[in-house]
Amino acid sequence: MEQKPIPGQDALVPPDADLAQQYLAAADAVAGRRDRAIDRRALAWLQILNAVVTAAYLVAFALVLRNDDVIASQMILFTFLVWGQLASGMAQRNGMQWRMTRSRWPVILGGGVLLAAAVVMFGLVSLDTTLPVGWVLLPAGMVLLGIGGYGVAQLIRASGDPHRPRPAWTPLPVAVRWGTVLVGAALGVLTMLAGAPDDVLRSVITLLVMMMLLAWIVAFNTPLGLPSVGAAWRWPHVATFFVAACIPAGLALGEESLGDRGVAGLLGGVVVILLFALVSFVPGRESRG
């Protein structure tokens, strides 16, 4: 073992062969524990899912902005923020570490440039209604190519990893169950507001709901926080969230084809709340802690 002694200090005595072997064994054990804690295949699939969700959000957000429906755009925005918090808990569950290493800088820089270009294109197609409506797919396609392509590359890189045993299922803890119900209640209220005919009342109540959601997002580090809820969710909970998120977006985008928008919003909100109340009793993922 070569070492550079500190100026003015004597060099350390090199370890003998037995102690050096113990050091190597300990280093291998640490690497093994790290590999068991990080599920690269699950993280890659989550990356791909986030790309699809972000692309769908950009399309829906651009369409409502082109229709000058500011309130609907706020609903879609906060639904996306809620998903971001839930997804962060899923990433932490699978061992994702937010470390800014030198090897990641090219990926971060390239992703930042691509996302910046997608944002510019998004603003262009959202605000310039003279452009064909099909152009809203361009920023979504850029996100799918960048974020989704990186997820596919991660999935290919993790193809040689050993398949992990299926995680144990366990009833949702009380705090997580109530958090799941609160997610459903928030999305249900937003769905009802999406169908409200009175724009003034809808804007006031929407602002109050947004402030409550923002306060909940700020309290992310609590057992009731969204990352803790997302870390315990399985596919039935995620599927319910996506179905619930599509209902208010559909009400906002299909305003002209709906006969009575208020009744549709009320029924949709009730359905969303009932779905989350039912899915809160579906077993979730066992905590890693």
Image (spheres, rainbow, N blue to C red):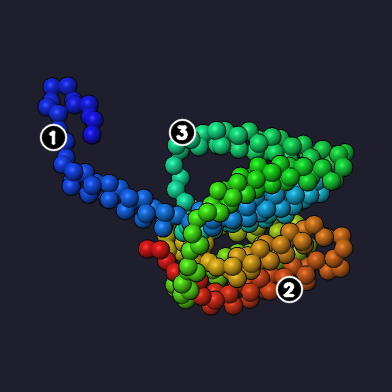
Mark in the foreground, 3 or 2: 3
Query: Residue drawn 47% across and 67% down?
Result: 165
The label on residue 13 is 1
Q: Amino acid at mark 1?
A: Val
Query: Residue drawn 30% across and 48% down?
Result: 27
Q: Amino acid at mark 3?
A: Arg
Badge 2 crowding class, 10 Å Cα cut-off, few under 14, some 14 to 19, many 20 or more, is: some
Q: Quadrant of residue 53?
A: bottom right
Q: Is label 1 in a helix, a strand or a loop?
A: loop
Label 1 vs 3, first from the N-terminus: 1
Q: CA distance from mark 3 to mark 2?
A: 52 Å
Q: Quadrant of the C terminus?
A: bottom left
**Could you tell me residue 130's position as x and y percent?**
87, 39
Which residue is under mark 3? 102
Q: Quadrant of the N terminus?
A: top left
Q: Is label 2 in a helix, a strand or a loop?
A: helix
Q: Quadrant of residue 279?
A: bottom right
